[in-house]
Amino acid sequence: MSKEFSRRQFLEMGAAATAATAVLVSCSGEGGGKLAGSTPAFLDQAPDGKPLTAGLIGCGGRGTGAAQDFLSAGPNLKVT
């Protein structure tokens, strides 16, 4: 007997697994020797390094704004 999953069930299970993983990693104290529960450092601009490519599919005007924000975040960035 095979059980098929709907797209909604798949996304719910994926989100739950991601959340559980995030909780386990933050509680284990991993992350460069920082204390569990500390917030990561956020940069104002993407660091220079290997080119970083983002894909954008069917997002309309809202996606265009997000793509512009991505491109202005630093060097070596492109949208495909």
Image (tube, rainbow, N blue to C red):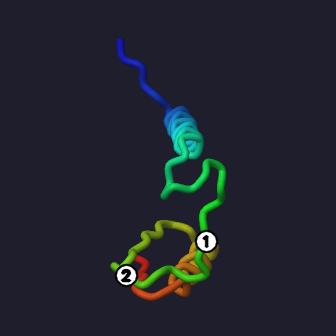
SS under mark 2: loop
* Residue type marked 2: Gly
- Which corner quadrant holds the N terminus? top left
- Which corner quadrant holds the C terminus? bottom left
User: Dot 2 corresponds to which residue?
Assistant: 49
One can see residue 11 in this view: no
Picture quadrant where residue 41 is located: bottom right
Q: Is residue 16 above or below residue 40?
A: above
Residue at horizontal 61%, vertical 48%? 36
Residue at horizontal 51%, vertical 84%? 71
Q: Is residue 5 left or right of residue 2?
A: right
Q: Position of residue 55 (x, y in %)?
A: 43, 69
Query: Looking at this view, is 18 or 55 the one in front?
Result: 18
Residue at horizontal 60%, vertical 63%? 40
Question: Mark number for residue 30?
Answer: none
User: Dot 1 corresponds to which residue?
Assistant: 42
Task: Please tell me which of labels 2 and 1 falls first in the chain.
Answer: 1
